[in-house]
């Protein structure tokens, strides 16, 4: 990035405040920083709305088909309604009538990052819904969560409940930051690949981040550091993992140190790493261009070979600014 000549007096201050990799001040960086501040302000306003768990709509019975009513009207003798065979057929017909139709696309589960909640996905959720994603679930985990493994187990229970309620065998997951790491642990270490078709991560420290050392007092932050026990578990072989991974990482992500830590590097996984140019960490679940990339990732056919995944991982890119 070339330094903006119009702002030379700010360079010493910039080098002092920003990490070394961001010390070269540019117009792109200024725009990304302004966008991050605006998103943070907006998110603080929306944050209280996402504290409570999302309401799950209860299935409403579908009306009995007209043909069924006609068939019942043909029964001239009321005693026929009590016939065991007729009762059994009626019971099965009623059960079929109230069963919700199952769309072809699996539900999408949205999982937020550290000290956050489901409100971060307001815009992404709207984008997915406008493009025929009928079943979208936003899950909250406690900000007091101190263990990625425990959070992954809780996620697994939620997904089992979602599959039972919707009639689907699989879901897609979009995880922002820590949420992506929790979802990956569930998929890779707890057998969640049987339930998760595609896992999309946004600015997730897959190899660990060194940013803000003062936060090491929090146990879950220590688990996101390079070389932690959790990350070492994720480095172990996973030859039978069926989930497809798509990792979006930004070249201006202030919370990823080094930046490439948000890429997934594992020889056994089906992976596509997508570089996003021009926005920061908070903008990843908000920016419309990233939302379009997420929709494309979710719509991609499951038949992806290891060779294709590795080739795409080296070439995927998305410029948003």
Image: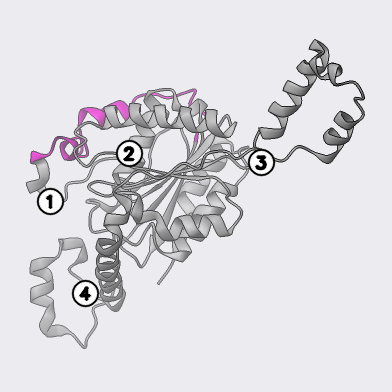
Tell whether 162 sits left or right of 106. Answer: left
Near-viewer residue (81 or 44): 81
Q: Which mark is residue 181?
A: 2
Q: Secondary structure at mark 3?
A: loop
Q: Earlier in the sequence, mark 3 or mark 1?
A: 3
How much space separates mark 4 and mark 2, taking CA atoms?
A: 31 Å
Visual colour scheme? one colour
Q: Earlier in the sequence, mark 3 or mark 2?
A: 3
Q: Earlier in the sequence, mark 1 or mark 2?
A: 2
- The range drawn in magenta is 217-243
Q: Position of residue 18 (x, y in %)?
A: 14, 65
* Residue of label 3: 104
Specify the quadrant that holds the N terminus: bottom left
Q: Earlier in the sequence, mark 1 or mark 4?
A: 4
Near-viewer residue (307 or 277): 277
Q: Nearer the viewer, mark 3 or mark 2?
A: 3
How much space separates mark 1 and mark 4, taking CA atoms?
A: 21 Å
Q: Which mark is residue 212?
A: 1
From what the image shows, is residue 80 above or below residue 94?
above
């Amino acid at each position: 990035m070339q330094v903006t000549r119009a702002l030379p007096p700010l360079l010493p201050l910039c080098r002092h405040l920003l990490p070394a990799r961001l010390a070269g001040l540019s117009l792109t960086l200024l725009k990304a920083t302004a966008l991050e501040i605006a998103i943070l302000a907006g998110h603080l306003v929306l944050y209280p709305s996402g504290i409570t768990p999302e309401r799950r709509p209860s299935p409403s019975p579908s009306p009995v088909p007209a043909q069924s009513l006609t068939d019942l009207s043909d029964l001239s003798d009321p005693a026929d309604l009590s016939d065991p065979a007729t009762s059994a057929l009626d019971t099965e017909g009623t059960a079929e009538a109230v069963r919700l139709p199952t769309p072809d696309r699996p539900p999408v589960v949205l999982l937020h990052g550290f000290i956050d909640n489901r409100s971060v996905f307001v815009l992404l959720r709207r984008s997915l819904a406008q493009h025929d994603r009928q079943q979208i679930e936003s899950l909250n985990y406690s900000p007091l969560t101190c263990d990625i493994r425990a959070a992954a187990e809780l996620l697994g229970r939620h997904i089992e409940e979602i599959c039972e309620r919707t009639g689907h065998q699989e879901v897609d997951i979009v995880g922002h930051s820590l949420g992506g790491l929790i979802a990956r642990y569930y998929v890779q270490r707890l057998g969640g690949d049987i339930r998760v078709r595609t896992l999309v991560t946004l600015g997730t420290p897959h190899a660990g981040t060194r940013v803000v050392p003062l936060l090491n007092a929090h146990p879950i932050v220590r688990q996101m550091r390079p070389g932690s026990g959790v990350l070492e578990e994720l480095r172990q072989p996973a030859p039978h993992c069926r989930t497809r991974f798509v990792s979006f990482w930004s070249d201006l992500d202030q919370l990823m140190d080094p930046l490439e830590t948000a890429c997934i590097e594992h020889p056994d996984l089906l992976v596509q790493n997508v570089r996003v140019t021009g926005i920061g960490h908070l903008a990843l679940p908000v920016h419309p261009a990233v939302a379009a990339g997420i929709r494309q990732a979710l719509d991609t056919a499951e038949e992806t070979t290891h060779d294709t995944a590795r080739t795409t991982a080296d070439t995927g890119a998305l410029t948003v600014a």
